Amino acid sequence: MSDVTARLLRSLPLASVLIGRNERMLGMNPKAEALLGADVSGRHFITAIRHPAVLDAVEACLADRQPRKTRMPTRHAGQDMTYEVHCAYLDLPGAEGVLVSFEDLTHVEQAGQMRRDFVANVSHELRTPLTALLGFIETLRGPARNDADARERFLSIMAAEAERMERLVADLLSLSRVESEERMRPTARVELRGLIDSVLRRLEPVARGGGVTLEGHLPEAEVTVPGDEDQLRQVVTNLVENAIKYGGSGGTVEVTLTAAEEIPGLRAPGARISVRDHGPGIELVHIPRLTERFYRVDSHRSREMGGTGLGLAIVKHIVNRHRGRMKVESEPGHGSEFIVELPARS
Ligand code: ADP
């Protein structure tokens, strides 16, 4: 293979190999070496590539000189990968053969799978309350038509199911808005002490209803960070609501705000919001998954408490947008602490 061809191969952005008319590997670029192994030059292409669909495409392209493309699922460094493989016939002086390029479509495939899972999850979440509503409508039209007591009871269950659907749709909309803005840094400035104080006042009746005492430990001075006020309000609200819902049996929920010149997780000046409960806590295996959409430690309890399974996913996206960090510390039997750290400067 000529020096020019070797340089051309090296400049290609995709993992690429050139297979000569004699069916031997003429050359490859470093990305292809990483994919197929470095010592395959000069060998017959069957020993280097091995994937049946790709071998067929190369053989056909050598025979009729027409371009081809095919898929190659494989495992590389312990991970499932998908490549789209393009074969094109080259007729260069000193380098005649098939140029095979491997385009990594793993991320596209994963995104497609995530989208399908998400649609399936949303459909499932909506179907449960819808099925209940349809069942009660049927009953009210038929057997319970003239039963005033039953009507009242069923209508209040129907209202609760409709509210569940409404909450789900509201959380889905909020998640989609937050995701679409995630790359746009917030430009306004938000004062966190007043914001947390107002969230605590608003949730006070909810806490009291659940037998929980809310304690705010707020600093003397104001704490201001660059941020989106509505979104940061949602972060504090979601975390405090969760602490009341899931950790309420511990009696108190403490919300602490501190400002520091150096926030360890951020290695920069910033603010730290901690929401601590003394409930049953969360086992370590669940902690990394809490921010996944629809992930619940105990689905039955979450549904009973009116949860949508989206609250912490929304929190994560908002914190990311603010270039902050969220940490969860918990020991089963000793409650949980959700910590959000936000940088003080944009
Ligand atoms: P949900 O709508 O179910 O509350 P979230 O995304 O807000 O959804 O929370 C996900 C799951 O994390 C909850 O279902 C619950 O199992 C768990 N969780 C959240 N906060 C706490 C907490 N303070 N104590 C124990 N478990 C919690």
Image (tube, rainbow, N blue to C red):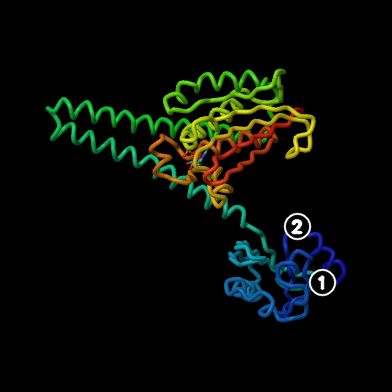
First reached walking from the N terminus: tag 1 or tag 2: 2
Residue type, mark 1 in image: Pro
Give, as a three-letter code, the residue at label 2.
Pro
Residue 51 sits above or below residue 132 on the image: below
The quarter of the rendered structure image containing the N terminus is: bottom right
Residue 19 spot, x, y in % from top left? 72, 74
Name the secondary structure under disc 1.
loop
Q: In this view, does 135 lie above or below 25?
A: above
In the depicted structure, whether residue 225 falls above or below residue 331: above
Task: Name the image quarter holding the C terminus.
Answer: top right
Numbered label tally: 2
Tag nearer the camera, 1 or 2: 2
**Residue 5 percent location from the top left of the image:** 82, 67
The image quarter containing residue 273 is top right
Q: Mark 2 points at which residue?
A: 13
Give me the residue at 74% from left, 71% from top.
18
